Image (cartoon, helix red, strand yellow):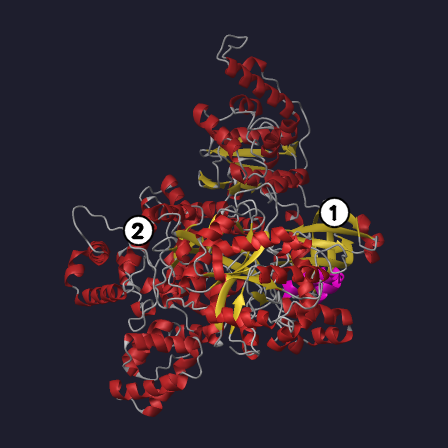
Amino acid sequence: MNSDSFVHLHVHSEYSLLDGACRIESLCRRSAEHGAPAVALTDHGVMFGAMEFYYAARDHQLTPIVGCEAYIAPRGRFDRAAREEAHVTLLAADLVGYRNLVALISKGFLEGYYYKPRIDLDLLAQHNDGLIVLSGCMSGMVSAPLLKNDYAKAKAAAQTYIDIFGDRFYIEIMRHGMPEEELINSGLVKVARELSIPLVATNDSHYLNRTDAPAHDVLLCIGTGKTVSDTSRMKFYSDEFYLKSAQEMRELFADLPDACDNTVAIAERIDMRLPEKLFHLPAYPVPGNGRALSAEAYLREICEEGLVERYGHERAAHDAALRERFEYELGVINKMGFASYFLIVWDFVKFARDRDIPVGPGRGSAVGSMVSYVLRITDLDPLKFNLLFERFLNPDRISMPDIDTDFCVERRDEVIRYVTEKYGSERVAQIVTFGTMAARAAIRDAGRALGVPLPDVDRVAKLVPSGPTGLNIGQALDQINDLKMLYNSSPEIRKLLDTAKTIEGLARHASTHAAGVVISAGPLVDYTPLIKLGEGEINTQYEMDWVERIGLLKMDFLGLRNLTVMKNAVDEIRRTADPSFTLEKIPDDDRRTLEMLGRGETMGVFQLESEGMKRVCADLHPSSLEDIIALVALYRPGPMEWIPRFISNKHGRTKPEYLHPSLEPILADTYGLPVYQEQIMQIARDIAGFSRGEADELRKVMSKKQKDQIPIYREKFVKGSAHTVGMSTAQAERIFSFVEPFGGYGFNKSHAAAYGWIAYQTAYLKANHPLPYFAALLTSMKNNTDKLVEYLDEARKMGIAVLPPDVNESLVDFAVIEQQLRFGLAAVKGIGESAVRSILAAREKDGPFSDLFDLCKRVDIRLVNRRTLEALIRCGALDAMPGNRAAQLDAVDVAIELGARASRDAFSGQASLFGHESHDLTGLIPQLRAISPPTTLQMLAWEKETLGVFISGHPLADVAEALARTGALPVKELRRQQDEAFVTLAGLITSVRRTLTRAQQQMLIATLEDTSGSIEIIVFSKLYAQVQALFVPDAILVIKGRLRWRDRPGSKPGEEPPTEPSVTVNEVAPFVRPAQARQPQGWHVTVSRRDQVDRLAHLLDEWPGVVPVVMHAGGAAQRMPRDVSGSHHVKHELQRIFGPDNVVEAAP
């Protein structure tokens, strides 16, 4: 034993969330620098970082000691009477101990969780083998009684541990300069000496360096929601909780050298080695049916059937290339031992398809597998699209296959439940993931804790670029002069940034991975610790990469909204037009679809609807599915620079250059440019003679830009090219140099093909079945007002009439009704699902409702209550019935009472006063009062309030052109503007809130809306007195000011939140409406249904005037007996009810 060594056995990493500040890699590197032979990891109650730590320690030639500072419930883990818990330090001495530790920590969450994950002495006794136990900190069962001078209880607790663990129990002693430690340490030594228990010295390390203590203090404040100035908060007593060197620890415990020696002795007891390269794959339960089939035999049987289904009997039996590919793939799969894996995936995908749960055409490299295709796991023929199996499974390197599957977002959980029930809840779990403090989030969190004024924090945070190509704080300080200037000129900002830099990137919270599911051969606790998160979902404590590293089967069950949209669109097509329609039979070269994409009309098309993609589509004019697939692959940072050349080559403006004739068949589909990783692999095979596995290795080297490996593969490529096709060294060098940069950017064609196909399918639906498609698309976005506005605008541009809800026509969601798009009742805010079901059931049972009173009489008035009725009236859902919206609202109380009376009579079984059935109260139905109709603006405001959008028109419709002449930028265009940009806006003020600044000065916050969207407007005190009178609801204003981007509320703590714009006002002026347009000479209205005649008559009653109306029906024309108002609202109403094409102004 080295008398100068010391091993830290009590260490907290960042996975002691918002408490530990040690990064695992840094911890291991520092321990190695200290000359330690080993180091332990003992996070609070969890093992989140155990695998990362295990491999990092080994990389630094340290013995990893996997442990945990666990919580013990003194009264038992099932007790919920008190929140007390004692701490204990558990260390895994060997593989048995590791598995017992995993079991204990898992049961702490699954059985003992009460504020903290708790275990008890019974569990410790059951799972004690292979564990070394330290008595813990001041909150331990031995130390805590000594704080109360109860030596006997402390000694008894130590004896309990001895009884369980024998010579694997140690008394833990700490010295951080705390008075309480001095009080208990003498007692601990006494207990140790009297019971012959070895002492062990530890430092409760929460950070690496003494200088990290202030940043750690800020981390504690973030975790507790306090500021550093709060004197009553939890804080560490001193700055001694860092990873001290052996010399520091030996000096600290100079009087107890054996306590330091024992740290090394414990390390020498550690013999824990995890098995390498083992796969814990579950065995698929092959059905017997009187036969003893292996997984391999059963897989072949199903695949042979699928081969015939996919390719037909003739090709399946006699196509040599087809059979060769099939046999090759099946051979590799079986050789690697993955037959059960494919059967498991086939089984749950089949479950989904059998239950009409939409499944995506594939995702990732698995789309390149013919076996996946014939099993209907994927839906794209890899032969047709020239996809490579070895991009999925490399025959030269055994690694876990990775088949990720997209499901309908609404029914994904059904598939996970099926898998859980089939393989057992003890073998299936979701996978944990961690939100970390990104640069801006770290600045904001640190700023709150340090008490830095919010405007200063906001100013600093915005100077750091965010997003995938953003900078960390250190890089930003090097590259951004404004930030550097602030850092150098302000001590407060310097402290903020230095603190944020220290905590940047640390784990902040644990959550469930959006898609990852793990399935194991045996109980999961044999391999990974478990945790309960959210609403009780069981998750692994190891992240996805570590789950795979230890050999567990990980699959991604992703929810894709677009699959739901397509399924609902297909259902609507079958309901309204073609009962046999299926997306499986659509042509992949539909002219209408490709022409629409060529016009850049991609709004609502999967993967193609961004502004940039619209422009690229319009420039490219896709002429094939291959073009769309290439766009999906190219439209990413990096390869985007090749898009102009791709387009130019396609249209013949430039000529594709093929450096060798053998390149042309490989690159022809992408106009001479290597867009896909598969093309790089194929070039390596066809030209340089690489094996399938070698070609995949080259692909990896290029895509990961492994510069040290590039020369090795370049030499191999040059030599292989000479041997395979007789190519000169110079030419081979040119080809390698040509493909190398593309190799770094190249995209997986299998994935691009699958998502390109979804893009094409959604485009096909939009181009050929716009009504059903928009019904499904709008339904999917009914809770996203911004997208709803965009999609409604796009639908109208395509000539689709969008009608408001109607209690006699609407279904639950958006639907096609007589070749028009009708809002669904579920889209009305404030209406619950049960109320919608009640309305639809009553309508289904007894037909359409005649008026408000009839509606209330027939529905369950407890469900269709006052709030529901008022929302229905305000959004226009009763417009086809007698009375205007104001008159209907006035009658709600009477109608509710009528409904309640009908309900009471029906319940009691009594007949009405007239002897009819109990619901027939015709004689008691009152009449609507004569009330003036609401103004156009009031009706539009109601629509906005209840639907989130304007339907019958827009308050700015008649002045839109005049507003545009002010030079105002449409609100939706603000997305392209930078923070601090000076902008001009013009629009309607829809809300105003007056408030006070922190300095108790007046300010106001308003919402301005134009026809493209809405934005928050801020007027600070400096301008408030001059302009506040202009800010009233319904005012139209022209505003000039500074654009500010700020975090959107509701984002997860610690993560980069999405940002939203606001404008701080510099100038404001009222908009002066142009002179009113002349009054129309008359209206010609074409009707096609009886109810439209009634609606026209109602409109004329509500808006009397002097403008004549001629009704056209069935080829005949008839002047209506009443004339109508010349109001602009009447024009809007006529066009809304009858459609713009059916309303024509009479010639002067």
Residue 271: x and y in percent read 43, 68
Q: Is residue 840 above or below residue 568?
A: above
Image-quadrant location for residue 100: bottom left
Which badge, 1 or 2, comes first in the chain's sequence?
Answer: 2
- The circle drawn on residue 123 is none
Q: Is residue 868 above or below residue 509?
A: above
Residue 368: x and y in percent read 32, 65
The stretch drawn in magenta includes residue 837: no
Residue 608: x and y in percent read 47, 60
Q: Residues within 10 Å of mark 2 (few under 14, many from 20)?
A: some
Which residues make up the magenta segment?
Answer: 440-460
Q: Residues within 10 Å of mark 1 (few under 14, many from 20)?
A: some
Determine the main secondary structure of the stretch shown in magenta: helix
Q: Nearer the viewer, residue 895 or 344?
A: 344
List the residue tagged with mark 1: 992
Q: Amino acid at mark 2?
A: Asp
Q: Secondary structure at mark 1?
A: strand
Image-quadrant location for residue 871: top right
Q: Secondary structure at mark 2?
A: helix
Q: Nearer the viewer, residue 910 or 654?
A: 910
List the residue tagged with mark 2: 347
Q: Amino acid at mark 1?
A: Val
Residue 1004: x and y in percent read 77, 51
Q: Nearer the viewer, residue 336 or 827?
A: 336
Q: Nearer the viewer, residue 381 or 569?
A: 381
Q: Residue at x 44, y 83 (%)?
A: 707
